[in-house]
Image (cartoon, rainbow, N blue to C red):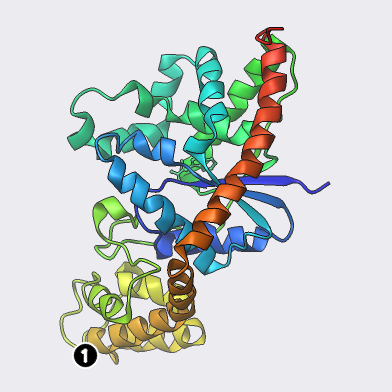
Amino acid sequence: MLKRILTGDRPTGQLHIGHYFGALTDRVALQDKFETYVLIADVQALTDNFNHPEIVRQNVLEVALDNLAVGIDPTKSTFAIQSLIPEIAELTVFYSNLVTISRLQQNPTVKSEIKEKQLLFKNSVTYGFLGYPVSQAADITIFEADLVPVGADQLPQLEQTREIVRKFNQIYGLILKEPQARLSNFPRIKGLDGNKKMSKSLANAIYLADNPKVIQEKVMSAVTDPAKVRLRDKGRPEVCTAYDYHKMFSGDELRTITQECRAGNRGCVFCKEQLSQNINTKLAPIREKRQSFASQPKTVKEMLLSGTAKARSVAQKTMLRVKESMLLVYP
Ligand code: TRP
């Protein structure tokens, strides 16, 4: 039997090139070797968008389109919409007894996210947001996933999941599967503003769906070496965001780019024009595929719903065993 993979995206915005290199390319390769479930985590997305349900609703489709566009194949992978599998919420409630508040408060990823969301949470975070790793543990274990491909920021979530599973198994004597993290080895791609993280909330992202003109404008705005003012100034590629992207998009040209920049033989405008062309060459087929799926919303919707139905039946089987072990099955 094939090992099972569970991956998830929060539908809070379209996916960008950071997702592409960090997760999506790996995800596409893995679907041939594993039984893959792609969870569109709308319930988790609501933990920090509870006041904007329309954003979450709209982005369920956008995230599905992005996955399809990069090559997630619905005949190989199963898409599932989290809110349509209420068993996940049920399991979350059971798991919440097995996690202490202080343990949740120690999660470094959640801690920094709370800081980033000052505007939303002011000086007191919600129960739902603090607890989202518990619901993520339910996402992962209800599908009995063996492997969870993640970026480094999600490792604390996986560790918490494993702790919950061990505690559950110890108390209720049921053997829930302890999932393993599968760390993607791609470095995080910088934001256009030079921030070490590309993200929607920082408004520094290039989206998979961006058209050539938008790509061009965004690349032109990318932060470069501040000490390189004139064409003939020697540049420091290591502090240049455009160079960071060249590494991902410019293949064999990278050597020349590096040499010319260091030697002061390359202007930033020319360099960025070349970059935006390379990005566009890479994204054009993805964008076309995305548009073609976007023009068949009914087909995409049916695919999401049939995937969800399949995923739900897996979840229901797990829940039956969970409830038996917790003495919650009533005749
Ligand atoms: N927390 C993940 C993120 O922010 C999304 C996610 C939700 C997820 N459920 C998951 C990832 C289950 C892996 C497994 O990107």
Q: Quadrant of the C terminus?
A: top right
- Residue at left 71%, top 29%? 317
Q: Is residue 63 left or right of residue 213?
A: right
Q: Is residue 85 above or below residue 68?
A: above
- Residue at left 72%, top 53%? 34
Q: Nearer the viewer, residue 13 or 263?
A: 13
- Residue at left 47%, top 14%? 100
Residue linked to disc 1: 232
Asked where in the image residue 276 lies, by quadrant, the reply is bottom left
Q: Is residue 113 visible?
A: yes
Decide: few, some or many residues near mark 1? Use Cα within 10 Å; few <14, some 14-19, many ≥20: some
Asked where in the image residue 169 lies, by quadrant, the reply is top right
Q: Is residue 144 visible?
A: no
Asked where in the image residue 210 lies, by quadrant, the reply is bottom left
Type of the residue with mark 1: Arg
Q: Position of residue 246 (x, y in %)?
A: 40, 77
Q: Position of residue 101 (x, y in %)?
A: 41, 15
Q: Is residue 216 left or right of residue 143?
A: left
Q: Nearer the viewer, residue 84 or 130?
A: 84
